[in-house]
Image (tube, rainbow, N blue to C red):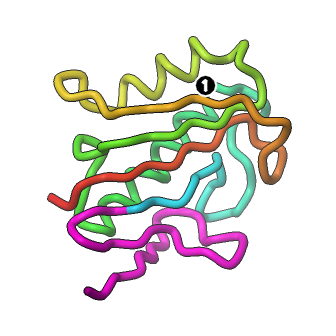
């Protein structure tokens, strides 16, 4: 069974040797997204974690749409934060973007650091529509 690489200009280009997402077996495996503006490649939010999460979700939406899916079809999410003190804010913003009726499985992990000084990174696995 073959797989398809997802590449869209609507989300930030990969900053390493990886794909934005891979589609295989009816699933979309999205690489972690940080709050990069796809047009400038710069971090969005100026240190405001709420704005960072909004940009991350916008980036994930663009990758999922390019893959033939959307945020409503997310099955599993992993959220990486540099400070769990931001958990409530991250949870609120993330929760506004995913299905309330069928919320995905999820893990949230505090990490020492993220690329480019981001405070949040989110990766997801979704079903193709």
Query: Would you place residue 17 above or below residue 45 in this image?
Result: below
* Residue at image location 27% in from the left, 51% down from the top: 70
- Residue 69 in the image: x percent, y percent? 24, 58
Q: Residue at image x 37%, y 24%?
A: 96
The image quadrant that residue 42 belongs to is: bottom right
Image x and y of residue 116, in percent: 82, 52
Q: Is residue 8 magenta?
A: yes
Left or right relative to 19: residue 111: right
Secondary structure beneath dot 1 equals helix
Report the side of 108 relative to 120 (left or right): left
In the rendered image, which quarter contains the N terminus?
A: bottom left
The residue depicted at 76 percent of the width and 23 percent of the height is: 83
Query: Furthest residue to the bottom?
Result: 2
Taking 95 as reference, is 70 left or right?
left
Q: 57 or 25, which lies in front?
A: 25
Q: Residue 23's quadrant in the figure?
A: bottom left
Q: Image height check: is 47 above or below 56? A: above
Taken as a whole, is the magenta stretch helix, strand or loop? Answer: loop
Residue with the mark numbered 1: 50
Residues drawn in magenta: 1-28
């Amino acid at each position: 069974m073959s797989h398809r690489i997802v590449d869209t200009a609507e989300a930030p280009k990969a900053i390493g040797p990886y794909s934005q997402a891979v589609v295989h077996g009816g699933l979309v495996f999205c690489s972690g997204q940080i709050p990069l503006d796809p047009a400038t490649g710069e971090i969005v939010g100026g240190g405001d974690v709420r704005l960072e999460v909004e940009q991350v979700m916008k980036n994930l939406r663009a990758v999922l749409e390019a893959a033939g899916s959307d945020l409503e079809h997310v099955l599993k999410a992993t959220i990486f934060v540099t400070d769990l003190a931001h958990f409530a804010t991250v949870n609120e913003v993330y929760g506004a973007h995913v299905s309330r009726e069928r919320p995905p499985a999820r893990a949230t992990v505090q990490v020492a650091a993220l690329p480019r000084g981001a405070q949040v990174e989110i990766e997801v696995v979704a079903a193709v529509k």
